[in-house]
Image (cartoon, rainbow, N blue to C red):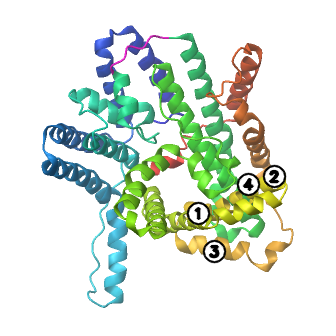
């Protein structure tokens, strides 16, 4: 079920109303049933995959807590392997098979290629797999007590606002909230609805309208010249941001209406002055997950390696980050490019600090933001391209000599309001985003402005929103 669908418009208020009408002791069951219905709206049979991993991790968590050191580690490994196995089979097996066939053919070992599995990737598999793994790891580390209530643990994994695209929650933040009795508060109602409205505005008005230009260009890049490709990449930067942050806003807002506080996933990432800073602001729940469970264990285990251990940890972490986004070499390169940039920033931090003192702070900050954003645009070519050939075509056409000249821009850009929407997106990022930040709450005690902004957002959604059941980009991960 999509947040931007008519089905959700009926589902959400009904689930919320029943939730507050029910006695507290029955609310977990109501939310679990609602979450099952929400997930089954995609491919119903895949809910059994979720129940399989939920059962394994629930049992593993109980056994880890009760067992001695060696057995505890074995149960943790069993749980992690079960989750990774499901992820590999559904997400990475065909990618591995494809590359194995290429290798076997190149070595002339066999002329019969290995068969591919004809399966569809379960929606949001990477998100709830990482969330489930964080539970058993935290129980193993002693930071979280094993959950005794199977239904509550199942709800921790399946809680519908963040089930298919995060944020990736930790058990310490979410599990205890299912035991707390939540009352319907005016503050939660106001903040939740406002955040959901602005999330829908980001998705339907900006992201999906930009997609009307971006998608055809990436589907047939040969039909467009260098200027068109540059515009498409620029538009995609805003498309992916408003698409994903829009989902996160709706997720956080809908949870807030139920009385739950989810982890913030974005903190004005386009204001970043470095790639390192960008990953502290973009998809925060994933970045912190990779830092806690991949990067930190590597540098702890190889602490005698000094700086080399840090560089190795960064490279491995970003390589995994790339592949987490998708099973393809384009995503692997995307991750490695970001890893290389962060390594460069780590190695040159003293030099750049000296340089910042010799340049006026305003120029240095603006220049840093421009260079960071330019780097992001380049790497998003690999993120959005369907294969390496398409990514290479984009880069070669953009870097060609003809790209230096003004070229014809198709009228469809103007006809579909893409330029206007892009400008609207820029204004939002540069001016309104901080003003409308729910955590800063700058609209508090300003009811007239609050009402004016919400009315404007609703008007724009109803007038210019695209409602063609366009899925959220991060659903494919």
For mark 2, give the secondary structure. Answer: helix
Q: Could you tell me which residue is drawn at 58 percent across and 28 percent down?
A: 196
Q: Could you tell me which residue is drawn at 54 percent across and 31 percent down?
A: 250
For mark 4, give the secondary structure. Answer: helix
- First of labels 2, 3 by sequence position: 2
Alpha carbons under labels 2 and 3: distance apart: 38 Å
Q: Mark 2 or mark 3: which is in front? A: 2
- Which is nearer the eye, 475 or 259? 259
Query: Seen in the image, is 65 located left or right of residue 450?
Result: left
Q: Position of residue 245 (x, y in %)?
A: 58, 40
Alpha carbons under labels 1 and 4: distance apart: 17 Å
The segment highlighted magenta reads 179-184
The answer to whether residue 367 is visible is no
Numbered mark located on residue 251 in the image? none
Numbered mark located on residue 393 in the image? 3
Numbered mark located on residue 346 in the image? 1
Please report contact status of discs 3 and 1: CB closer than 8 Å, yes or no: no
Alpha carbons under labels 2 and 4: distance apart: 12 Å
For mark 1, give the secondary structure. Answer: helix
Q: Is residue 451 magenta?
A: no
Find disc 2 in the rendering and name its residue.
361
Find disc 4 in the rendering and name its residue.
369
Q: Position of residue 152 (x, y in %)?
A: 28, 27
How packed mark 3 is, by other alpha carbons closer than 10 Å (few <14, some 14-19, many 20 or more), is: some
């Amino acid at each position: 079920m999509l947040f931007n669908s008519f089905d959700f418009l009926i589902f959400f208020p009904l689930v919320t109303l029943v939730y507050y009408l029910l006695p507290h002791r029955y609310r977990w069951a109501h939310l679990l049933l609602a979450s099952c219905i929400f997930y089954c709206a995609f491919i119903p049979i895949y809910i059994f995959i979720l129940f399989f991993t939920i059962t394994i991790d629930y049992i593993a968590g109980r056994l880890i807590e009760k067992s001695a050191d060696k057995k505890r580690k074995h149960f943790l490994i069993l749980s992690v392997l079960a989750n990774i196995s499901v992820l590999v089979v559904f997400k990475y097996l065909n990618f591995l098979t494809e590359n194995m066939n290429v290798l076997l053919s190149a070595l002339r070992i066999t002329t019969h290629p290995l068969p591919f599995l004809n399966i569809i990737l379960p929606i949001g598999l990477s998100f709830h797999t990482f969330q489930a793994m964080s539970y058993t790891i935290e129980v193993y580390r002693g930071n979280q007590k094993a959950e005794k209530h199977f239904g509550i643990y199942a709800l921790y994994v399946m809680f519908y606002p963040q089930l298919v695209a995060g944020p990736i929650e930790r058990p310490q933040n979410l599990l205890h909230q299912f035991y707390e009795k939540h009352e319907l508060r005016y503050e939660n109602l106001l903040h939740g609805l406002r955040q959901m409205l602005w999330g829908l505005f980001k998705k339907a008005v900006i992201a999906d309208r930009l997609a009307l230009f971006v998608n055809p260009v990436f589907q047939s890049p040969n039909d467009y010249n260098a200027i068109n490709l540059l515009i498409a990449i620029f538009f995609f930067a805003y498309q992916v941001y408003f698409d994903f942050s829009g989902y996160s806003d709706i997720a956080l807002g809908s949870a807030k209406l139920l009385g739950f506080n989810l982890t913030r996933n974005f903190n004005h990432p386009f204001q970043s002055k470095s790639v390192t800073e960008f990953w502290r602001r973009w998809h925060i729940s994933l970045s912190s997950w990779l830092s806690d469970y991949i990067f930190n264990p590597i540098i702890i285990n190889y602490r005698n390696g000094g700086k080399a251990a840090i560089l190795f940890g960064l490279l491995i972490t970003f390589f995994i980050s790339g592949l987490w986004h998708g099973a393809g070499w384009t995503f692997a390169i995307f991750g490695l490019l970001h890893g290389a940039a962060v390594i460069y920033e780590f190695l040159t931090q003293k030099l750049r600090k000296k340089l910042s003192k010799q340049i006026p702070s305003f120029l240095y900050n603006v220049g840093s933001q421009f260079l960071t954003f330019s780097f992001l645009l380049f790497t998003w070519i690999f993120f959005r391209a369907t294969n390496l050939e398409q990514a290479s075509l984009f880069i070669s056409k953009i870097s060609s000599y003809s790209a230096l000249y003004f070229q014809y821009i198709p009228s469809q850009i103007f006809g579909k309001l893409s330029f206007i929407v892009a400008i609207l997106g820029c204004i939002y990022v540069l001016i309104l985003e901080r003003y409308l930040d729910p955590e800063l709450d700058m609209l508090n005690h300003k009811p007239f402005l609050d009402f004016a902004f919400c009315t404007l957002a609703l008007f724009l959604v109803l007038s210019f929103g695209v409602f063609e059941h366009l899925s959220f980009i991060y659903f494919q991960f």
